[in-house]
Amino acid sequence: MAYINEHYLKLKAGYLFPEIGRRVTAFSQANPQARVIRMGIGDVTEPLPPAVCQAMHKAVDEMADRSTFRGYGPEQGYDFLRQAIAQGDYQSRSADISADEIFVSDGSKCDSANLLDVLGERNRIAVTDPVYPVYVDTNVMAGHTGSADDKGEYSGLTYLRTTAGNHFIAEPPQQAVDVVYLCSPNNPTGTALTRQLLSRWVEYARKNNTLILYDAAYEAYITEPEIPHSIYEIDGAREVAIELRSFSKLAGFTGVRCAFTVIPKALKGRTPNGEVVDLHRLWGRRHTTKFNGVSYITQRGAEAVYSPAGRQQVKSLVDFYMENAAIIRQNLRELGLGVFGGINAPYVWMKTPGQLSSWEFFDRLLHEAHVVGTPGSGFGASGEGYLRLSAFNSRENVNEAMNRIKQLKL
Ligand SMILES: *Cc1c(COP(=O)(O)O)cnc(C)c1O
């Protein structure tokens, strides 16, 4: 019999979304006439932009013809897409990133997990609380933590608490860490790091030799000018940061699958003996060995996001969701509820009324308004007393959900 990776046994069994699913199913079975509105999911609802579809159709036709058919592409991504990204996302913002520093992949979730392949065992790792659970669970799986306590927190990880007191925005800690995960704009809290605070993070990282894993999956949702779109807009970030980006929330690619990771050539890691190693080269080795590239059709679709028509269509998609977010924010504020996020991200992070716990309020919303949110406590101890509402929905559903919430006696 084969031996297993025992680190998997440390994972907390009761994962957030299955528990939500269980409660919603039980409610729907008992109340078959109720029309439940799901505002819990972090998935897009609107179809792909027309420019993307046209490019993909054209690519399918090329694949159908012997003279333009393509087999395996370069593992790191086709040059046409890497160039479009380097120009469209970085050089246009005076961020010094070149096409060969971009690795195209099938998702940021996988990339954030896969990055652990090239990082060693002895890193002191920091995550925020609340946090996107993938960062934590993949470190548990890789054996970088001890076991979980009653609160679900793993020994060996450093938790950076974000609360109403610091506006749910993570600040650099007093102590030095080797790796820190920053997600901005943030899932789940919807808040974003300002240029000034991100500069402090880069300064901290340079001083302490910290590697920043910067997840900018929601970059397209930024509306305020003081929020940087890339960490490489900050001087000195090339030596300390890896940036993850995805077409999922940008252009509705959650079911198509395309993302990229930026590893600047200036970025270094070290061996336990202090030997300095190039992380770009290490990641290149990993990526070309374990991955065979994103499909040509998908990469042509992603390239079209950078065309003039594509840009405009993506912007109206994002604007649509952000109008939903504004409607959610405004309605909750009118009810006198504490609200964070929803300005530079498609998530609104609301305080539960009357000291209810996250799950108590989740149940009330489900049973009395037939609206599903995501309990904040599922993202970490500091999320207790909060609920995440997603702006990924139809306008009709958002308006209906807000009307129902207004009728509750909160
Ligand atoms: C949705 C999301 C991603 C994107 O993941 P993909 O695998 O590219 O779909 C990455 N990070 C966070 C925090 C997300 O919410």
Image (cartoon, rainbow, N blue to C red):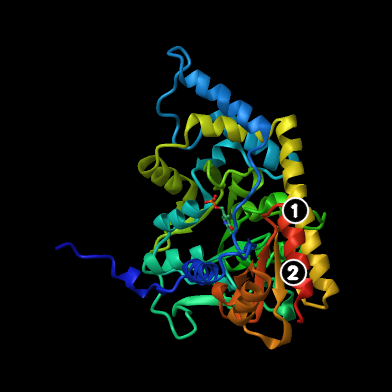
Which amino acid, mark 1?
A: Arg
Position in image of residue 227 (x %, y %): 77, 57
The three-letter amino acid code for the residue at tag 2 is Arg
Disc tally is 2
In the displayed orientation, state which residue is furthest to the right: 334
The residue that mark 2 highlights is 404
**Label 2 CA crowd tier, 10 Å (few <14, some 14–19, many 20+):** some
Task: Give the residue at mark 1.
Answer: 395
79 w.r.t. 388: above or below: above
* Residue 15 spot, x, y in % from top left: 46, 70
Given the current orientation, which residue lies at the most extreme front position? 33
- Depth check, mark 1 against mark 2: the one in front is 2
- 249 w.r.t. 398: above or below: above
Q: Residues within 10 Å of mark 1 (few under 14, many from 20)?
A: some
Q: Residue at x 73, y 37 (%)?
A: 313
Between 249 and 267, the residue placed more toward the observer is 249
Residue 134: x and y in percent read: 49, 63
Q: Secondary structure at mark 2?
A: helix
Please tell me the numbered disc located at residue 193: none
Position of 103 with respect to 139 (left or right) is right
Which residue appears at 63% of the width and 32% of the height?
A: 52
Q: Counting residues from the N terminus, which is met first, the one under dot 1 or under dot 2?
A: 1
Would you say residue 343 is visible in this rendering?
Answer: no
Query: Does mark 2's beta carbon lie closer than 8 Å to ligand 1?
Result: no
Distance from label 1 to label 2 (Cα)?
14 Å
For the point 66% across and 45% down, the residue is 46
Q: What is the quadrant of residue 344 in the picture?
A: bottom right
